[in-house]
Image (cartoon, rainbow, N blue to C red):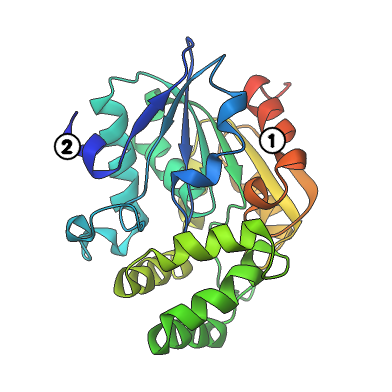
C-alpha cells in the first residue's frame, strides 16, 4: 500500500472496467456512501477514501498550511489516483469534495471522464451579485460556536445540516462522524471551506459535470446549482431532487441512490 493510500484509508471494492471514485464532504468519512456502494460493486471498480482531517485519519498527518486551500485536497486526489494507477474515473464528490474534484480536473483533465456533484457550492458567502447563502456575520457566529464548545456545536449543527430531528439515524450518523474530528482540525477545515471561492476557476473546467442538489439545503441554496450550470466551462446538467438536507445520500437514499446511478451510468445528451 502506498503512502497516499494508507494516509487516506483508501479502500477499493467491486470489479468492472470503469472506476468510480467516491469523495465525501465536511464532517463525514467514506461511510457516508454506505447506501450507494452495494449498487455499484457488480458493475464498477469503486474507490473510497477519507479526506485528510476526517476523524478516521491520523491527525498528525493534517498539515494546517497545506489545507488552508482546497488545492491541497485536490493534489491528494491526484496522488491517490496516480498511486492506484487509475487512468480515468467517474468522480462523485459530495459538498466540498465536489469543488475539490473540479480543481483536480483542471490540473489533470486526463484523469476524469465525468464529475457528479452532490450539494456543491463554489462560494458560500454572499456577494453583491451572487447569493451563496451566508453573510460574514453568520460565519463568525458559526466559528465562535465551534471554538467555545465543539460537542455542543456538533449536536446543534447535525440536525440543521441533515434536515430532520435528532432521533433520525442520519442525524446520529452525521453527529458521530462530525464529533470524531479533532476540534481544532474541524475549525480549520470549516474556515477553509466557508471562505473558499472557486468561481474564478469554473470556466476552466472541461469535464462534463452532473450537478445534483436537494430542494432544501441549509448550506447550499438551490440557485447555486444553476450558477454552477451557467458558469462551468464544460457541459453540465442540473437535477434538483425533492429531498431535504445537505447529506441526501445519507438521509434519503431511496430517492438519491437511483438518481446517482442514472447520472453515473448515462452521459449528458448533446
Residue 35 rendering spot, x and y as whole percentages: 61, 38
Q: Is residue 150 above or below residue 211?
A: below
The quadrant of the picture occupied by the N terminus is top left
Instruction: Return the mark for residue 110.
Output: none
Task: Say what secondary structure mark 1 lies in.
Answer: helix
- Report which residue position mark 1 lands on: 257
- Report which residue position mark 2 lands on: 3
Residue 114 rendering spot, x and y as whole percentages: 54, 28
Question: Within the image, what quadrant is residue 9 found in?
Answer: top left
For the residues bearing labels 2 and 1, Cβ distance under 8 angstroms = no
Neighbor class of circle 2 (other Cα within 10 Å; few <14, some 14-19, many 20+) is few
Relative side of 238 to 199, left or right: right
- Point 33% across, 35% down: residue: 10
Q: Is residue 251 above or below residue 196?
A: above
Task: Say what secondary structure mark 2 lies in.
Answer: helix
Relative side of 6 to 232, left or right: left
- Point 65% across, 42% down: residue: 211
Amino acid at each position: 500500500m502506498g503512502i497516499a493510500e494508507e494516509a487516506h484509508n483508501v479502500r477499493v471494492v467491486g470489479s468492472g472496467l470503469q472506476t468510480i471514485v467516491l469523495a465525501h464532504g465536511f464532517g463525514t468519512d467514506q461511510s457516508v456512501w454506505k447506501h450507494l456502494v452495494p449498487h455499484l460493486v457488480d458493475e464498477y471498480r469503486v474507490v473510497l477514501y477519507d479526506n485528510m482531517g476526517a476523524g478516521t485519519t491520523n491527525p498528525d498527518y493534517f498539515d494546517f498550511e497545506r489545507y488552508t486551500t482546497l488545492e491541497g485536497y485536490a493534489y491528494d486526489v491526484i496522488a491517490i489516483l496516480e498511486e492506484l494507477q487509475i487512468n480515468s474515473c467517474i468522480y462523485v464528490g459530495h459538498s466540498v469534495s465536489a469543488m475539490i474534484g473540479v480543481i483536480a480536473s483542471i490540473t489533470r483533465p486526463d484523469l476524469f471522464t465525468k464529475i457528479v456533484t452532490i450539494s456543491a457550492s463554489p462560494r458560500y458567502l454572499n456577494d453583491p451579485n451572487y447569493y451563496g447563502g451566508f453573510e460574514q456575520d453568520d460565519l463568525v457566529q458559526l466559528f465562535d460556536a465551534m471554538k467555545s464548545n465543539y460537542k455542543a456545536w456538533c449536536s446543534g449543527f447535525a440536525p440543521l445540516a441533515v434536515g430532520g430531528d435528532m432521533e433520525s439515524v442520519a442525524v446520529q450518523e452525521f453527529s458521530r462522524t462530525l464529533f470524531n474530528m479533532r476540534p481544532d482540525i474541524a475549525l480549520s477545515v470549516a474556515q477553509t471551506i466557508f471562505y473558499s471561492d472557486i468561481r474564478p476557476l469554473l470556466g476552466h473546467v472541461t469535464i462534463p459535470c452532473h450537478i445534483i442538489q436537494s430542494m432544501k439545503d441549509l448550506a447550499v441554496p438551490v440557485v447555486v446549482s444553476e450558477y454552477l450550470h451557467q458558469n462551468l466551462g464544460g457541459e453540465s446538467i442540473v437535477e434538483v431532487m425533492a429531498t431535504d438536507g445537505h447529506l441526501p445520500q445519507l438521509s434519503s437514499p431511496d430517492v438519491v441512490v437511483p438518481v446517482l446511478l442514472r447520472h453515473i451510468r448515462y452521459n449528458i445528451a448533446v
